[in-house]
Image: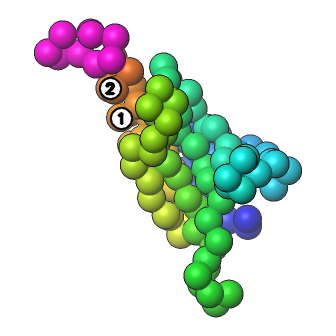
Amino acid sequence: MGFHVREGISNCAEVRLRPGFVRMVMAQPDGDGAMTMSLARIGHYDVRLFEFVPETAADPTPICLELYDHETRCRIDSCRCYDLEAAVKATEEFTARARQLARESRGTGCNG
């Protein structure tokens, strides 16, 4: 994937995304044929890239991200981003949500 980085975008999310793209190219598909690459693991929650094949050849290839729960083996949320800036923002949001969910699952959230 070749994405242009806009000036001013340099944070942890971008630092995680760039090597994730490189590792994704060399990743092996899982049992379902999907390719995923973890960007951040917080408790049993994972923020990760996943491969998405565009519906038509003319569609731009999006950056696909998901928030995954290893305990339930379910995707909690996902999104497609068409530029690095949006992917950085989504990565930050999923990471913050994973932290919140991990705190709540340990019983240390606001209600625990």
Q: Amino acid at mark 2?
A: Gln
Instruction: State the extent of the magenta-drawn residues as a range.
Output: 104-112
Question: How many residues crowd mark 1 within 10 Å: few (<14), some (14–19), many (20+)?
Answer: some
Which residue carries the number 2 mark?
Answer: 100
Instruction: Report whether residue 21 is seen.
Output: no
The vertical placement of 107 against 12, above or below, is: above
The residue shown at (62%, 53%) is: 50
Looking at the rendered structure, the secondary structure element under dot 2 is helix
Q: How many marks?
A: 2
Instruction: Give residue 107's position: percent from left, percent from top.
Output: 27, 10
Instruction: Give residue 66's position: percent from left, percent from top.
Output: 49, 48
Q: Are marks 1 and 2 in contact (CB under 8 Å)?
A: yes
The residue shown at (72%, 47%) is: 31
Location of residue 2 (image quadrant): bottom right
The vertical placement of 82 against 87, above or below, is: below
The residue shown at (35%, 35%) is: 97
Left or right: 52, with 82 as reference point: right
Which residue carries the number 1 mark?
Answer: 97
Asked whether 3 or 62 is in front, the reply is: 62
Location of residue 25 (image quadrant): bottom right
Where, quadrant-wise, is the C terminus in this rendering?
top left
| Label 1, label 2: how far apart the Cα atoms are | 5 Å
Left or right: 48, with 67 as reference point: right
Asked whether 63 or 51 is in front, the reply is: 51
The vertical placement of 6 against 40, above or below, is: below
